[in-house]
Amino acid sequence: FIGAFIVALLAVKFILKYIERNNFIPFGIYRIVVAILFFLFVLN
């Protein structure tokens, strides 16, 4: 549990630093692609 908590904190810290340097467009494209693949997998 503690290990997962530490990894989550590091991931959030990394994402926030990435967003400060870049914009949301690559992240948004990634999320849309993952959502489409997920729905295709679930519906088939």
Image (cartoon, grey):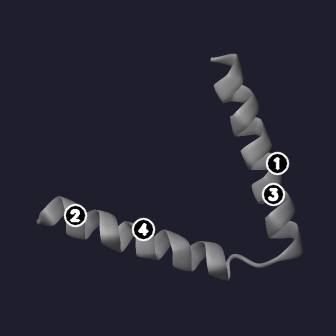
Horizontal arrangement in the rendering, residue 35 relative to residue 10 (left or right): left
Neighbourhood count class around disc 4 (C-alpha, 10 Å): few under 14, some 14–19, many 20 upward: few
User: Which residue is under mark 1?
Assistant: 13
Horizontal arrangement in the rendering, residue 2 relative to residue 31 (left or right): right
Q: How far apart are marks 4 and 3 (CA)?
A: 20 Å
Q: Distance between the residues labelled 2 and 1?
A: 31 Å
Neighbourhood count class around disc 2 (C-alpha, 10 Å): few under 14, some 14–19, many 20 upward: few
Give the residue drawn at x 75%, y 29%: 6
User: Which residue is under mark 2?
Assistant: 41
Q: Earlier in the sequence, mark 2 or mark 4?
A: 4
Q: Distance between the residues labelled 3 and 1?
A: 5 Å
Q: Please say if the residues under marks 4 and 1 sit with CB atoms less than 8 Å apart.
A: no
Q: How far apart are marks 3 and 2 (CA)?
A: 30 Å
The quadrant in which residue 5 appears is: top right
SS state under label 4: helix
* Residue 34: image location, x then y, percent: 42, 68
Q: Is residue 16 above or below residue 27?
A: above
User: Which residue is under mark 3?
Assistant: 16
Q: Disc 1 marks which amino acid?
A: Lys
Q: Please say if the residues under marks 3 and 1 sit with CB atoms less than 8 Å apart.
A: yes
Q: Disc 2 marks which amino acid?
A: Phe
The quadrant in which residue 17 appears is: bottom right
Q: Please say if the residues under marks 4 and 3 sit with CB atoms less than 8 Å apart.
A: no
Horizontal arrangement in the rendering, residue 19 relative to residue 24 (left or right): right
Q: Which of marks 4 and 3 is nearer the N terminus?
A: 3
Q: Earlier in the sequence, mark 3 or mark 2?
A: 3
Q: Disc 3 marks which amino acid?
A: Leu
